[in-house]
Image (cartoon, rainbow, N blue to C red):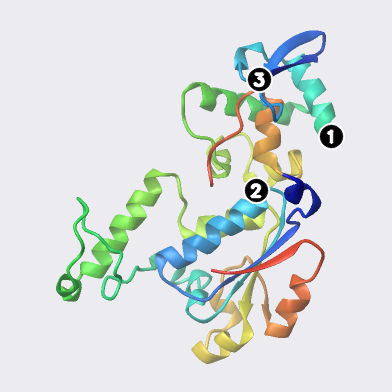
């Protein structure tokens, strides 16, 4: 316990670089959890992670069903890779995951961003990735506070008791 | 398990100060816990605490998201009413256990 007392986490800076359901939710749960604990929170979305803050995409994320070695069918059997090529399978699996999450009171991405913002968390987009994917500021959620270069991200991340977490 | 005295009444609390018996709670007690937590209670505080207590009694999980369904206040106001860690603070003052939720 002495460690916790002497070095409390005062600030977390999360980086989300991937856009599958589980990647984005790992970031959102950790970010919202930090906000709920009263920890200053910055979340930086880059590369495919940008999908989580693009208005037209945020609530339509998918999970990978081909090349996802941990994916199992209901009942616990491994998902055969060949099943993954059936049209609609990825949408179905993603829908299943989202409905399971809804049962646990895990909100959709857009509502999660509302909660984080309501608690004072900051949400940022990566400038380089925005340029690369040809997104404009208008494409992003109104909760995005700014489009940052990596240098600016590090400026925001500074301070005693601050942690940078790459999900 | 330990005990604390608020407003002249002795109550059972756990090591973090959360009530272990929510029926020992009263509004006068809440006022004193709130003072410890640096919160000055208003009608809005009491209204949302009543929602939290009812939800706890019915066995529903407490989450930050559930505040939006309370029809009392929204999440943003909740953060303003109980600055810092609102769900932890509000449940402590409302005399119910600390929520075991990640959301």
Label 1 sits on residue:
B38
Q: How far is the residue under mark 1 from the one under mark 3? A: 24 Å
- Element on which disc 3 rests: loop
Q: How far is the residue under mark 3 from the one under mark 2? A: 26 Å
Q: How far is the residue under mark 2 from the one under mark 1? A: 17 Å
Q: Position of residue B87 (x, y in %)?
A: 64, 38
- Element on which disc 2 rests: helix
Mark 3 crowdedness (10 Å alpha carbons): few <14, some 14-19, many ≥20: few
**Which of the numbered marks, if any, corresponds to residue B1?**
3
Query: N-terminal of the two: label 1 or label 3?
Result: 3
- The subunit letter for the residue under badge 2 reads A
- Element on which disc 1 rests: loop
Q: Position of residue A78 (x, y in %)?
A: 21, 62
Q: Quadrant of residue A151?
A: bottom right
Q: Position of residue B39 (x, y in %)?
A: 81, 33
Label 2 sits on residue:
A36
Residue drawn at (71%, 45%), measured in percent from left and top? B79
């Amino acid at each position: 316990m002495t460690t916790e007392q002497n070095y409390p986490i005062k600030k977390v800076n999360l980086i989300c670089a991937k856009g599958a359901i589980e990647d984005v939710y790992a970031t959102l749960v950790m970010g919202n959890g930090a906000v709920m604990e009263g920890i200053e929170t910055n979340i930086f979305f880059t590369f495919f992670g940008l999908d989580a803050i693009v208005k037209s995409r945020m609530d339509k994320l998918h999970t990978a069903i081909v090349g996802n070695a941990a994916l199992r069918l209901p009942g616990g059997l491994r998902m055969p890779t060949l099943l993954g090529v059936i049209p609609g399978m990825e949408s179905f699996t993603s829908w299943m995951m989202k409905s399971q999450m809804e049962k646990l009171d895990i909100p959709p991405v857009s509502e999660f961003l509302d909660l984080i913002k309501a608690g004072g968390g900051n949400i940022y987009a990566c400038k380089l990735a925005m340029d690369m994917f040809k997104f404009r500021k208008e494409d992003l959620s109104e909760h995005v506070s700014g489009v940052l270069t990596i240098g600016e991200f590090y400026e925001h991340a500074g301070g005693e008791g601050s942690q940078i977490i790459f999900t | 398990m330990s005990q604390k005295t608020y407003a002249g009444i002795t109550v059972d609390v756990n090591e973090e100060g959360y009530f272990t018996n929510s029926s020992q709670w009263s509004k006068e007690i809440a006022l004193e816990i709130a003072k410890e937590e640096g919160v000055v209670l208003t009608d809005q505080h009491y209204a949302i605490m009543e929602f939290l207590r009812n939800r706890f009694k019915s066995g529903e999980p407490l989450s930050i998201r559930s505040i939006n369904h309370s029809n009392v206040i929204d999440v943003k106001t909740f953060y303003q009413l109980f600055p810092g860690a609102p769900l932890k603070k509000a449940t402590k003052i409302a005399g119910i256990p600390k929520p075991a939720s990640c959301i």
